[in-house]
Image (tube, rainbow, N blue to C red):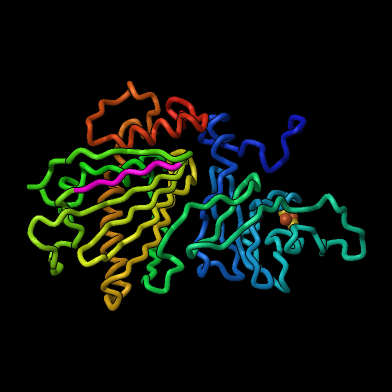
Amino acid sequence: MSLPKNVTESQALPRDCTFSASDWQVLSPFWYPVAISEEVKDKPVPVKLPDVKLVCYRSRGQVVIARDLCFHRGAPLSKGWVENDEIVCPYHGFRYNCDGVCTAVPAHPASKISPKLKLITYPSIERYGFIWTSLAGTEPNLPAFAGWDDPDYLNVLPPGFDIAGSAGRQMEGFLDVSHFAFVHTETFGDRNNTEVPQYKVTREGSVLSADYWSTVSNYGKGQENPAPEGFMWLRAFRVFAPFAATLTVHFPNDGKLIILNFASPVSARYTRLFCPIARNFDKSVPIEEIVKFNLQVFQEDREMVESQTPEDLPLDLAAEAHIPADRTSIAYRQLLSELGLGRNYTS
Ligand code: FES
């Protein structure tokens, strides 16, 4: 199939695309994390970003990201291996260097190789413990994540967390402040503390900010809670469209817990959550304990995100009912609409 003029191979709609064509065109140029840096060595790893199958590996220590497709007979390179800094296709042994150029066709070792025999490669960067890429190779514009590079903060990197739900629904759940008392009763929520005080959402450029003050504690159930009676907890949200947000929870004694929530859209109905955490207190607590607690919180949210109807996030504000507590999610839906996503952005 030939591509329309001015559409490069890397911008063509993927096979079996689960997004509408226009939504895919809007979402695909953004930078997304695809893997945890230290998990990618010289063994090829298959990843998917919105609906495009990619292979990720290291060659000479550098990350290589390419379409997971050998153009000889369509075999997935992620089933191959890396040898002498080149990826080897598992079907007929073609080899490709880190620029994606084919360097060997074992069936015809003496023949000249067409320079057209080349993989589609993508740019990559490593940041906040992840490998990021963009299908359109646009300028990287990653969300700010204070605390990660600050020696005063402990960095925690939970494993990538898979959700059979849309990135928009997951993001909205992260921004939702009225579900703590119902969804997170096993971890930090309090069924007797349901009221959501007024709060404001402001916007600077394309970044949303919501500073939410309440008495809902962020200490885990069973944890020592040194907060004085009536302590007001500040949860400061910053939202970066389409699928990133940070939350800074202000603990007693200037303690800060900063979470980056990045919902990477594997497809319209499948999301890989990357969620690094930085905090400047209780730094001697074993990392495994912090990861375990956060995985439990993610699991509680996942059950809801995977069962909501419709599965996609309705951007038409008339499609669902709203309450004052939903201010952030309403502003988030408006932000996604402004990007050019459809009313039901994945429909
Ligand atoms: Fe890759 Fe044949 S399919 S070498």
Stretch of the chain drawn in magenta: 207-213
Q: Position of residue 162 (x, y in %)?
A: 40, 53
* Magenta span: chief secondary structure: strand
Q: Position of residue 57 (x, y in %)?
A: 61, 64
Q: Position of residue 6 (x, y in %)?
A: 75, 33
Indicate whether residue 211 is drawn in magenta. Answer: yes
Residue 167 relative to residue 178: left or right? right
Extreme residue in the bottom direction? 284
Question: Which quadrant, please, contains the N terminus?
Answer: top right
Q: Nearer the viewer, residue 139 or 133?
A: 139
Q: Quick check: can you spot residue 1?
A: no
Kindly identify the residue that appears in the image at 55 percent across and 67 percent down: 40
Residue 92 relative to residue 300: left or right? right
Q: Nearer the viewer, residue 320 or 266?
A: 320
Ligand 1 position by quadrant: bottom right
Q: Quick check: 34 above or below 173? A: below
Extreme residue in the top direction? 318
Q: Quick check: 217 above or below 58? A: above
Kindly identify the residue that appears in the image at 48 percent across and 26 percent down: 342
Q: Quick check: 5 above or below 95? A: above
Kindly identify the residue that appears in the image at 14 percent across and 62 percent down: 221
Q: Quick check: 330 above or below 187? A: above
Q: Position of residue 140 (x, y in %)?
A: 59, 51
Q: Nearer the viewer, residue 302 or 139?
A: 139
Indicate whether residue 172 is drawn in magenta. Answer: no
Q: How many marks?
A: 0
Q: Quadrant of residue 123?
A: bottom right
Residue 338 relative to residue 324: left or right? right
Q: Nearer the viewer, residue 129 or 91?
A: 129
Residue 173 relative to residue 183: left or right? right
Q: Quick check: can you spot residue 196?
A: yes
